[in-house]
Image (spheres, rainbow, N blue to C red):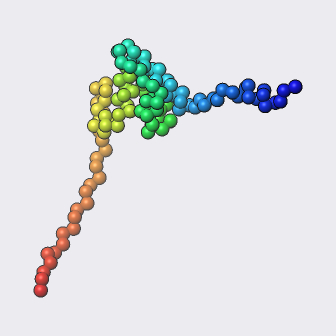
Amino acid sequence: MEHIRAHIKAITSKKERATERGELMQYFLQALNRSRARDGILPLTMPRMGRVLQAIPTKDLYYLKSVCDQASNFSKKFWWEINPKKHTLGRSPTGETPQPAPPAPPKKKALKRAPRTRG
């Protein structure tokens, strides 16, 4: 009779480290590499995809996935959405007119002081 540890090791020998973030990264990787292969560009790797998506929270990745799925060009929409400079300029990749920015708060007036006198 074998020790119970032998049976448990056989079942858990493969470490399962799948996470929802990892699954989303894999999804983006496959979708982007399809268009990259078509264009003759080298495919992205998982470490590179991790670096690209490093600062984006997981909940925002779900939004990014839905927006990119609805776009006609997945790759173009993906790279536009993750670039923060594009959003501050108020441009859209599809040429849509963006919503106007809210007005800036009024500036505070500087107080004028009376000139100093020596004496």
Q: Quadrant of residue 84?
A: top left
Asked if one can make out residue 18 in the rendered structure from this viewpoint, the answer is yes
Front position in the image: 70 or 83: 83
Front position in the image: 3 or 117: 3
Task: Give the quarter of the figure containing the C terminus.
Answer: bottom left
In the figure, 22 relative to 110: above or below?
above
Asked if one can make out residue 66 in the rendered structure from this viewpoint, the answer is no
Tell me residue 115's x, y (percent): 14, 75
Front position in the image: 32 or 112: 32
Task: Give the quarter of the figure containing the N terminus.
Answer: top right
Tell me residue 6's x, y (percent): 78, 28
Front position in the image: 15 or 20: 15
Q: Quadrant of residue 38?
A: top left
In the figure, 33 relative to 57: above or below?
above
Identify the residue at horizontal 69%, vertical 27% (top origin). 13
Identify the residue at horizontal 41%, vertical 33% (top origin). 52
Residue sticking out furthest to the front: 2
Residue sticking out furthest to the top: 38
The number of discs equals 0
Tell me residue 118's x, y (percent): 12, 83
Residue sticking out furthest to the right: 1
User: In this image, 112 relative to 105: left or right?
Assistant: left
Tell me residue 50's x, y (percent): 46, 32
In the figure, 77 relative to 103: above or below?
above
Identify the residue at horizontal 49%, vertical 23% (top origin). 27
Identify the residue at horizontal 26%, vertical 55% (top origin). 106
